[in-house]
Amino acid sequence: MTVGVFGDLGTPSYAPGASGRDVERDAVPDPRTRGARDRWRMTPEARALTVVSGVLALIGLVVLFSASAITAMNEDKPPYAYFLKQAQGLLVGVVAFAVTAKLDAERWQRWAWWIMGGSLLMMLATVLPFPPFNTIIAPERNGSHRFLLGGSLQPAEFAKLAVIVWTPMMLVRKAAVLRRLGKGLGPFLVVIGLLSLFAMMQPDLSMAMTFCVLMAVILFAGGARTAHFVFLGLLAIPLLVQKVQDTPYLKRRVDSWLAGEAKTEKPASSVADQQNQSLVAIGSGQLLGVGFGEGQQQRGWVPLAYNDFIASVVGEEFGFVGIVSLIVAFAAYGWLGFRISRQARTPYLSLVALGLTYITVLTAFVHLGVAMDLLPNTGLTLPFISFGRSNLVLTMLMTGILVNIGSTRERTYGVDATDPFVASPA
């Protein structure tokens, strides 16, 4: 039997009530009540997570409008063009959140193979080198093939969800042989390895690394042997270094960051200039910022200011307070998510909650680190904030799953049956 960070994978050992197991509000209903229904009631952690996510999403719309207005006008579009697209994505995301928050998260265990299979097929469609895949279905954009359907769908984003729901499913199923390299870790390495290979072919090394790190975190929490991670790491590091050396744009990014070029007065490369301008934007914001819509860096100084470097816009227009507020918000998201993970009603859901929380918080802090030149440029967006409908919808969907894991199923009667925020009586 395998015992990991979250306990025995084969025997759930979670206490009723606080764990989220089904509870019944009244053993015998009052005959005067008008109807009864089973429903999900949010725990304090789930309610707080909903509030934090809503605030982040609204801040994202505000910041995005300022960051993208000039770019839109330069493209002969209305200044609110990107804002409207993001608002459409947020509406879809809210629906996805509402559905997944009320959908029993255990169902994702049954759907895991279908989701992973679909993700593999979509990722494969982006890298097939012949028509119509490379001309119509997944045409080149900015030197890569990462999108389907004219840019409205980014399969790699939804592949992250596939990794999160599939890896715990296989981990629970293979708990008895997990500590064996071949039968235990072999299937994970093959399937996630394929996803990572397709990501590198797009090319998108950041996403390939994200898949692998996400798998490793879930496996480690589930009880995989540390020696296996050391062994695989020793194999992977030389391959990663070689890939960076063989990919010109990656090599330029890493070499520039290691040399500290972004901190020089006049960077010699465009890669360093992007992070240099980000530092200028954050520095010029000082304590409280220059004010909403008054930033200068999104006027072309920082390429993709509404996407890869939107944190620099926050730093310039809202200052040190704005950056710290983002850090606190995502730290709160992480704290709440990990509490939900520890209190989950099954081992599978515990690991899913861990993955959902980890990927959102990791992506956020990597983005903030890049904007402040603490990390080399990775191209990762800021969840809830950066432009990108696929990413926003996925983030809202994943948060909805996390909220469901942090909710309890109850039988309620009367008027309380329709109010998810009414606290259960002691």
Image (cartoon, rainbow, N blue to C red):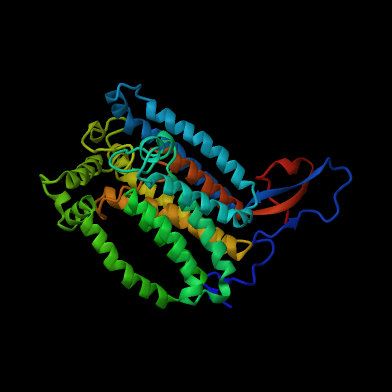
What x and y, as percent, mark residue 107? 63, 54
Quarter holding residue 81: top left
Query: So how many labels did they put on this image?
Result: 0
Residue 217 shows in the view: no
The residue under the point 37% across, 56% down is 197
The residue under the point 30% across, 40% down is 288
Q: Is residue 7 above or below residue 139?
A: below
Side of 306 where 399 appears, left or right: right
Side of 248 where 291 appears, left or right: right
Q: Is residue 421 above or below residue 344?
A: above
What x and y, as percent, mark residue 378? 30, 51
Side of 280 where 77 appears, left or right: right
The residue under the point 36% across, 40% down is 134
What x and y, as percent, mark residue 240? 29, 62
| Nearer to me, 4 or 142 | 142
| Nearer to me, 322 or 80 | 80
Quadrant location, the C terminus: bottom right
| Nearer to me, 333 or 126 | 126
Residue 413 shows in the view: yes
Residue at the front extreme, as displayed:
130
Q: Is residue 102 above or below residue 405?
A: above
Residue at the right extreme, as displayed:
31
Quadrant location, the N terminus: bottom right
What x and y, as percent, mark residue 364? 38, 50
The residue under the point 67% across, 67% down is 15
